[in-house]
């Protein structure tokens, strides 16, 4: 996965325009799957105070209506623990979609290396005093 350096895609423009009430945007990236994977998507990261906000009320994604995603079952003992939990998603008729995820407090550093969290912020997320949100936008054309 590499960050691209070209005119922003529609996914990137949507990610840049997304807001989360009471949260600060940490980073936005336009991402390409690489030469063998033409998939392009954008991600935005936000951090704010606990408790976790209602994603339907707090997250505003331009042109995409979000719906709550039912939590999945707990992982089986042989499965890897889930570090990112999708809590809301939405899709336009043209296929442009967005999802909102919460980062769990037990996330190891490699899982969030691209998020630009400082060591202090990571400690706050682990302690539960801060909430970390990842927004993904995909399928939006150019």
Image (spheres, grey):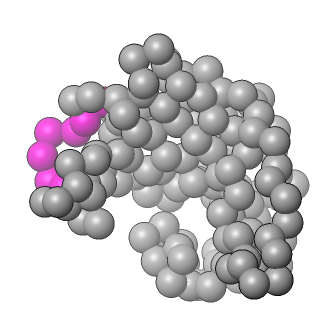
- Residue 52 located left or right of residue 118: right
Question: Please, what is the dominant secondary structure of the magenta stretch?
Answer: loop
Exactly how many numbered labels are in the figure?
A: 0
Residue at 27 percent across and 28 percent down: it is 141
- Residue 61 located left or right of residue 11: right
- Looking at this view, name the residue that lies furthest to the top: 93
Question: Which of the 4 image quadrants contains residue 7?
Answer: top left
- Residue 81 appears at what percent x and percent y? 73, 77
Q: Which residues are magenta?
A: 4-10
Residue at 64 percent across and 75 percent down: it is 121
* Residue 92 in the image: above or below residue 20: above
Residue at 37 percent across and 34 percent down: it is 139
Q: Is residue 103 magenta?
A: no
Question: Which of the 4 image quadrants contains residue 100?
Answer: top right
**Residue in front for this viewpoint, 41 or 12:** 41
**Residue in front for this viewpoint, 21 or 89:** 89
Q: Is residue 8 magenta?
A: yes
- Residue 115 located left or right of residue 105: left
- Residue 138 located left or right of residue 128: left
């Amino acid at each position: 996965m590499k960050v691209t350096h070209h005119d922003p895609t529609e996914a990137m423009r949507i990610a840049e325009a997304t807001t989360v009430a009471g949260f600060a945007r940490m980073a936005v990236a336009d991402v390409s799957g690489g030469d063998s994977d033409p998939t392009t998507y954008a991600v935005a990261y936000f951090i704010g105070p606990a408790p976790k906000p209602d994603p339907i009320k707090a997250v505003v994604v331009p042109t995409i209506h979000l719906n709550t995603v039912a939590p999945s079952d707990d992982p089986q003992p042989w499965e890897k623990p889930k570090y990112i939990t999708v809590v809301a998603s939405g899709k336009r008729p043209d296929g442009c979609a967005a999802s909102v995820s919460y980062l769990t407090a037990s996330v190891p550093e490699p899982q969030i290396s691209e998020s630009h969290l400082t060591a202090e912020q990571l400690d706050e997320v682990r302690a539960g005093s801060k909430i970390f949100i990842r927004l993904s936008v995909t399928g939006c054309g150019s």
